[in-house]
Image (tube, rainbow, N blue to C red):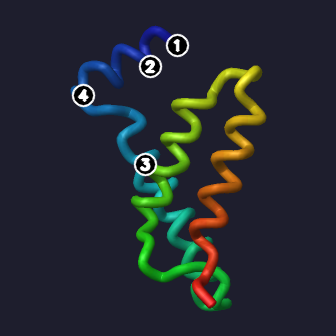
Amino acid sequence: MADALRAIATTGKNPYGHSRDMIEAAIATLMDACADAGTIRTDISPSDMSAILAGIAFTSAQPEQREQAERLLGLALDGLAARQ
């Protein structure tokens, strides 16, 4: 394990740098499907949604904050709903 970590460190690159792109691609796929179905707004980008989810995770990450996280996620999902 130490050898693997040293090898990663010597590259000077963030080994998790591609994770954000992968998450946003997954979010984009889901959002595209929902937009095609007419269930969500089309003026919100995957990076906007990623920022919303990161904010919820950052501010409500503790087990005792689960109810708050659920409320915030509910607000975010309500805000995504397609305008009628």
Which marked residue is nearer to the observer: mark 2 or mark 3? 3
Look at label 4 and name its amino acid. Answer: Thr
Using the image as rendered, state which of residue 7 and residue 35 is in the foreground.
35
Give the residue pinned by disc 3.
20
Q: Position of residue 56 (x, y in %)?
A: 57, 40
Classify 74 as above or below 41: above
Identify residue for label 4. Answer: 11
Circle 4: element type: helix
What is the quadrant of residue 6 in the picture? top left
**Which is more N-terminal, label 2 or label 4?**
2
The residue to which callout 2 is attached is 4
Q: Is residue 49 above or below residue 19?
A: below
Q: Secondary structure at mark 2?
A: helix
**Mark 2 Cα shell of 10 Å, populated few (<14), some (14-19), many (≥20):** few
The answer to the question of whether label 4 and label 1 lie on touching residues, with beta carbons closer than 8 A, is no
Point out which mark residue 1 bears. 1
Element under label 3?
Answer: helix
Using the numbered discs, state the Cα–Cα distance from disc 4 to disc 3 in whole angstroms.
19 Å
Is disc 1 placed on a helix, strand or loop?
loop
Residue drawn at (39%, 47%), measured in percent from left and top?
Answer: 18
The residue mark sitting in front, 3 or 1, is 3
On the rendered structure, is 71 left or right of 14? right
N-terminal-most mark, 3 or 1? 1
Image mark count: 4
